[in-house]
Amino acid sequence: MSKLSQLRSFAVFGLVPGLVGFLILASWSLASAAPFPVSAGLALLATAIGGWQRFLAGFQDLFHGRITVNVFVVVALSATLAIGEFRPAAIIIFIMVVVGALETFTMDKSRQSIRSLLDLTPRTATIRVGQQERIVPVEEIQVGTAFIVHPGERIPVDGVVSGGTSSVNQAPITGESMPVEKYEGCELFSGSLNLTGRMEARASKVGEDTMLARIVQLVEKAQTTKAPIQNIADRFTVWFLPTVLVLAVIVYLTSGDLKSAVSILLVACPCAFAIATPTAVTAGISNMARKGILVKGGMFLEIAAKLDALVVDKTGTFTMGQPSVLEVISFSDASKLEVLQLAAAAEKYSEHPLAKAVLQRAKAEGLEIPRPDEFKIEVGKGVLIRWKDEAIAVGQPDYLRSRGIALSSEMDGLISGQLEQGRTVIVVARGTKALGLISIADEVRPETRNVISTLYRVLGNTNITMLTGDNPRVAASVAEQIGIERVESGMLPEGKCDFIKRLQESGLVVGMIGDGINDAPALALADVGIAMGASGTDVAIEAADVALMNDNLERVADFILLSRTVIRRIKANIFLSLIYNVVGMILGAFGLLSPIIAIIFQEAGCISVVFSSTLLLWARPKRLPA
């Protein structure tokens, strides 16, 4: 926390309430010993010190034609002072200041859980200068600077690994509970903890551009955004104040007791009603941010609570978003590892995504990838190399046939079986003999089937549609694997937008889940756009209403369930605040409340609402039974 923030907190939580309390005690103790103007003056001074901001805000709202809670306070306190109740007015202000300090403390506590993330960023960093290492303030690091992270140190800025491997705990950024393996080319996030190995990296983002800083900025901005349900409070105060004024006048005319009339004004102040929504939204957004769910504003919590349809992009959401080797089948005496090794040798210098999938699988199997003596690529068909004086051909079945390599009916059957599952097949041959095949596809995330089942239960229906630009065969294969019933294939970005429009026109509240880049138009069009894996793309945070900081689809269900919890808590807060107001006004109408007791009763409602909202900081999504 900055020195300015600390000073402000000291003033709000300690200095002002303490000074107001001291003046009230002094006024009370001098009431019999000193002239009335002295004790009354001390009480008025306490009222001015503790309530000037309330009075100023109230008069400003009146000037602009707005009927707000501050206007209520100005009317009630003005009436209290007008009947000569100076010390009660000061006590009322003191109680308001103390309760206001409690509310501010609670709101700051919610925000501090996010702002404290910035404390994870180390103050210094180790950079490389030539062959030497030097420790410098983190502010000196620029984009492109080479820096070093030793085991046990926190990563100072966002960067890309240029050397070394390690396990990194990046839970503050992505919400992942398990460490993530990092190696050359992997992204690093400021504030993450390096656990095991020494890494060298180059800075890609520094200062306020780091992902950690942007998360804090995004959440703090979101916490100030109103939810639509909060507009109820704004509309409520417009007609409530005239109603209360009429009631206070009626009580005075029927009883002749000014104190009872003033007590009604004091007990009717809708302070608890006014904070019912913002305190809950702030706590809910803070809770979700700690779980790696970034929500851009309270309005999206309310919309998410009403979702009854989800549209989900396939690639990068239900699947990993990159091709991977799913199966290696041998046709002959050659082992599966030999087939894979020869394919990797042929693809060693290729930039094709399928080649990268083969090389990645070979490395995972611990295979040594030989360097071919000759290398020739035929774009869109396959690769031909020579290694150990033998010709190795890798590519599509038709490419191998064109080179005189025979494929038996049994081999064709195995190839057809893979193609029917929506997989891409490459065949490996040595000389004129086919050795085996490798099937490649965009691998389905292992948790997807269970998540789909959970989302069906959360929505209360099966209105989840998978959209994909892939052909119907691939789409049907993935849908069968994950247990989804509705599929739309061959969809371009425009088609996805049209599909969402049709759902919305039918009266459905639609959520869109995508990777935040090619799905940006659909994410923006949906009632709630949810971007997956936002830590890897700036576009995701900009395009979507909600950004999930890792690729865990379960966070979508958590987001919906927690949104419902927040909205239920807001409604409970509103009901609770109205109960306090109504009961208090009834008691005041019968002359059972003094001004001081009235404000104590009214502020008790504020404390109840603040406490209720604070509990959301630790709320957990309640999983629905299967």
Image: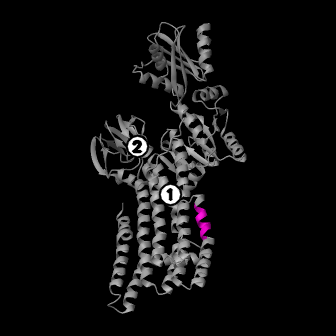
Amino acid carrying label 1: it is: Ala
> Which region shows up in magenta?
230-237
Query: Taking 558 as reference, is 490 above or below it?
Result: above
Which badge, 1 or 2, is on the more N-terminal residue?
2
The residue wearing badge 2 is 171
> Would you identify the image quadrant in which residue 97 lies?
bottom left
User: Residue at left 50%, top 86%?
Assistant: 82
The residue closer to the viewer here, 186 or 385, is 186
Query: Taking 374 as reference, is 211 above or below it?
Result: below
Q: Is the magenta stretch mostly helix, strand or loop?
A: helix
The residue wearing badge 1 is 280
Callout 2 crowding tier (Cα within 10 Å): few <14, some 14–19, many ≥20 = many
Callout 1 crowding tier (Cα within 10 Å): few <14, some 14–19, many ≥20 = many
User: Residue at left 72%, top 47%?
Assistant: 505
Percent coordinates x, y for residue 439 in the rendering? 55, 20
Q: Horizontal placement of 23 versus 261: left or right?
A: left
Q: Horizontal placement of 55 versus 22: left or right?
A: right
Q: Which of the labelled discs sits on residue 132, or is there none?
A: none
Question: Element at badge 2?
Answer: helix
The residue closer to the viewer here, 90 or 221, is 90
Residue 407 visible in the shown view: no
Q: How far apart are marks 1 and 2 (CA)?
A: 24 Å
Residue 131 visible in the shown view: yes
Query: Taking 87 as reference, is 513 above or below it?
Result: above
Question: Element at badge 1?
Answer: helix
Q: Locate the N terminus by quadrant.
A: bottom left
Tag in front: 1 or 2: 1
